[in-house]
Image: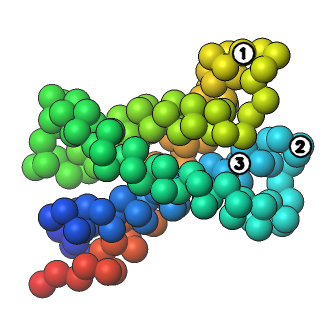
Amino acid sequence: MSQNNMFPRNLLENVIFTIIMAFLMVYAMICYNIAINIGGMKDAIFMMALGELRIMWPAAILLELFVMERPVMALTSRVATQEMPFFFVLLIRCALTVCLMCPAMSLIATLLFKDYAEAGLVSVWLQTSIINFPMALIWQIFFAGPAGRHIFALLFRRA
């Protein structure tokens, strides 16, 4: 599969790519957080996650498309060019996107799903972000990123 097939070229492709990547990241992170909250992984978590997914998936799509995309691209273009595809993808999707999206999504999850009355919003949000960050980075680098680009390439086969 050509490297060319793995990158969005226009607005529609970008939206579809974002939808794919947001699903892969959000669903995994919801499962991860539920597993932490209940003390371990169980098959039931996969179904339990669907309730939060209805809220968090659209939130991630909107956040990525309308808030985070421009800052991530601006920061990336300072360090890499598209002529360095591996480094460019690694920097965008793995480093900068996770660095910005993880705290933002952790804030949304904290506001919606965490009990922060006693410890305080900032403390619970920071703790949630710190717990989520390593998983989000590893998941993005080794699983969601490659899988999302592969799915995208299958949908947009180019000559």
> Dot 2, how many residues are within 10 Å of its Cα: few (below 14), some (14-19), or many (20+)?
few
The quadrant where residue 94 appears: top left
Q: Secondary structure at mark 2?
A: loop
Residue 126, relative to residue 53: is it above or below?
Answer: above
Q: Amino acid at mark 2?
A: Gly
> Dot 1, how many residues are within 10 Å of its Cα: few (below 14), some (14-19), or many (20+)?
few
Q: Residue at x 77, y 67 (%)?
A: 47
Q: Earlier in the sequence, mark 2 or mark 3?
A: 3
Which residue does the numbered mark 3 point to in the structure image?
32
Q: Secondary structure at mark 1?
A: loop
Which residue does the numbered mark 2 point to in the structure image?
39
The quadrant where residue 51 appears: bottom right
Relative horizontal placement of residue 45, taking residue 130 as reference (left or right): right
Q: Position of residue 105 (x, y in %)?
A: 53, 39
Disc 1 or disc 2, which is closer to the eye?
A: 1
Q: Amino acid at mark 3?
A: Tyr
Residue 124, relative to residue 145: is it above or below?
Answer: above
Relative horizontal placement of residue 22, taking residue 149 as reference (left or right): right
Which residue does the numbered mark 1 point to in the structure image?
120
